[in-house]
Image (tube, rainbow, N blue to C red):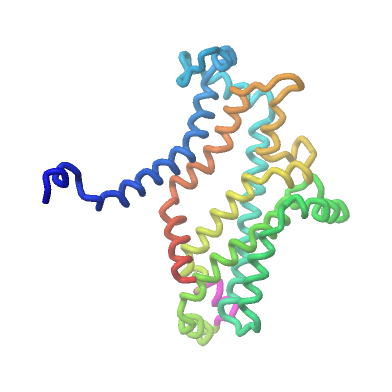
């Protein structure tokens, strides 16, 4: 080994360094916007527009959060979002579990074609579905109700939930279901009493994905529920802006209120979500 070679470490660390840099870039890209919104929510309007820009608030204040709840019925919007997201999640899991079980267990012809169609159905831009969904809900008299959002959200969540559950159901031995049916269970009973509990990681992962999708959705919530009492959180936040002004500190405070439930949910159950996605990918 020459003297020059001894002065430099071996190149074996390069892949590790590249992975570290890539991970740091992903973390910064994901967390910096949320951190900036949090810091903005603690600033006064005067400090926000002051130059040069200050990164940290000199005099942090919670007045923006107080105004976020008083200027608009933010608590009502929050309750609407929770109700819609929970109902949509439950409906999505019930329907997708039945669909996934049929694909995984029944001797269906063209099974691969069915899975392809499920994937393809999720590729339509939501804006192209807006008019038919609106007309359907208007005809049924469901506008300005929770149902007007729960039904479309359930349909939109079905592809991803079904694909996640299919891979988990396929990994469960059929003998367990057969034993349950010998003991008196129907096929539907075997699904809910045996298969679904054993596929709990997949069910949990599908539920989290469905909840987040319903929580964040804006276009349908804006179009189908125009009533002030039925607005969800994403739509309600847009109402803080005035005709000639944007109270960014107050808007940022409302955004933090919207982010916190999802952040807490992911922080508490991130291992199950990541584990469920990984196991599903390997089993599929």
Instruction: State how many labels appear.
Output: 0
Q: Dividing the picture into quarters, in which one does residue 129 lie?
A: bottom right
Residue shown at the point (52%, 37%) measured from the top left? 260
Specify whether residue 190 is painted magenta: yes
Taking the magenta stretch, the answer to whether it contains residue 204 is no
| Rendered position, 95 above or below 265 | below
Q: Which residues are magenta?
A: 185-194
Residue 32: x, y in percent?
Answer: 48, 34
Instruction: Kindly give the residue lying farthest to the right in the view shown.
Output: 139
Main SS type for the magenta part?
helix
Name the spot of residue 60 as percent of width and height, x first.
Answer: 48, 17
Residue 259's quadrant in the figure? top right
Q: Residue at x 47, y 66 (%)?
A: 281
Q: Nearer the viewer, residue 199 or 115?
A: 115
Q: In the image, 51: left or right of 240?
A: left
Q: Residue at x 78, y 51 (%)?
A: 130
User: Relative to the observer, which residue lies in front, 76 or 112?
Assistant: 112
Q: Is residue 190 above or below residue 277?
A: below
Residue drawn at x 55%, y 12% is 50
Q: Residue 243 in the image: x percent, y percent?
A: 76, 22
Q: Is residue 167 left or right of residue 3?
A: right
Q: Position of residue 233 (x, y in %)?
A: 66, 38
């Amino acid at each position: 080994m020459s003297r020059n070679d001894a002065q430099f470490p071996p190149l074996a660390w390069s892949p590790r360094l590249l992975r570290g840099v890539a991970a740091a870039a992903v973390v910064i890209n994901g967390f910096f916007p949320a951190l900036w919104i949090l810091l903005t929510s603690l600033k006064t309007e005067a400090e926000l527009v002051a130059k040069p820009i200050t990164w940290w608030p000199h005099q942090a204040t919670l007045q923006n959060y107080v105004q976020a709840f008083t200027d608009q019925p933010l608590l009502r919007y929050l309750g609407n979002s929770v109700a819609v997201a929970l109902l949509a999640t439950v409906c999505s899991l019930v329907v997708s579990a039945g669909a996934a079980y049929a694909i995984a267990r029944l001797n269906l012809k063209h099974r691969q074609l069915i899975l392809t169609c499920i994937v393809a159905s999720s590729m339509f831009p939501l804006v192209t579905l807006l008019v038919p969904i609106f007309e359907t809900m208007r005809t049924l008299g469901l506008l300005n109700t929770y149902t007007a959002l729960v039904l479309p959200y359930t349909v939109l969540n079905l592809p991803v939930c079904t694909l996640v559950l299919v891979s988990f159901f396929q990994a469960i031995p059929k003998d367990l279901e057969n034993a349950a049916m010998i003991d008196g269970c129907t096929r539907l009973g075997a699904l809910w009493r045996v298969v679904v509990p054993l596929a709990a990681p997949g069910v949990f992962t599908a539920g989290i994905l469905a909840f987040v999708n319903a929580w964040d959705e804006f276009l349908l919530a804006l179009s189908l529920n125009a009533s002030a009492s039925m607005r969800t959180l994403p739509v309600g936040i847009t109402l803080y802006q005035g005709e000639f002004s944007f109270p960014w500190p107050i808007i940022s405070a409302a955004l933090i209120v919207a982010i916190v439930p999802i952040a807490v949910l992911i922080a508490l159950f991130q291992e199950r979500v990541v584990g469920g996605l990984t196991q599903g990918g390997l089993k599929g």
